[in-house]
Amino acid sequence: MGTATNWTDLELSHGHTCALNSDGEIWCWGRNQSGELGRGTQTSSEPTPAQTGNDSDWVFITTGGNHSCATKENGTLHCWGENLNSQLGDGTTNQGLSPVAINRPSAWKFLSSGEDSSHQCGIKVDGSLWCWGN
């Protein structure tokens, strides 16, 4: 990963980091106690960058306290990691160890989450602002 030159976005939280490349892949590393790396596992830490899932159609990524969210080319929203305050937006407080599609109608053009936050906000392509979590 360190020698790649096709990185388009880098998102940092207080415990984990995720990067998006021009191939549409998400790579994450760092703390993973809540599954925030999206690898389907829950460990104390993962020092080596690894791809989150096998998908290659991601266009936007954001990282929060112990969670991450991203959008795909088709505009769908996916989140994973800690969900104690419903920050994944799936209507539950169940932790997500891998990216899960969130049932929020319409396509998304922007996502944001504070470094230590337990909430998430996004702007849909129609310009409406949505926030969820605590």
Image: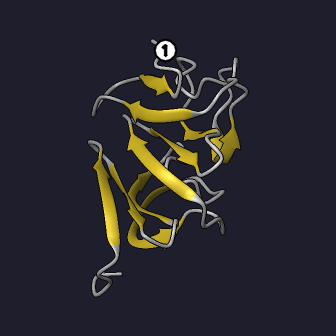
Q: Residue drawn 45% across and 12% down?
A: 134
User: Given the current orientation, which residue lies at the most extreme front position?
Assistant: 126
Nearer-the-camera pick, 46 or 112: 112
Q: Position of residue 103 (x, y in %)?
A: 73, 27
Q: Residue drawn 49% across and 72% down?
A: 50
Tell whether 19 sits left or right of 122.
left
Nearer-the-camera pick, 125 or 53: 125
In this figure, which colouring scheme has been used for the structure?
secondary structure
Residue under label 1, please give it: 128
Amino acid on which disc 1 is placed: Ser
Q: Is residue 132 above or below residue 12?
A: above
Q: Residue drawn 60% across and 61% down?
A: 57
Write down the quadrant of residue 71 in the picture. top right
Q: Position of residue 25 (x, y in %)?
A: 52, 67
Q: Residue drawn 36% across and 81% down?
A: 1
Q: Is residue 134 above or below residue 124?
A: above
Tell whether 16 sits left or right of 56.
left
Q: Position of residue 5 (x, y in %)?
A: 29, 81
Q: SS at mark 1? A: loop
Write down the quadrant of residue 113 in the picture. top left
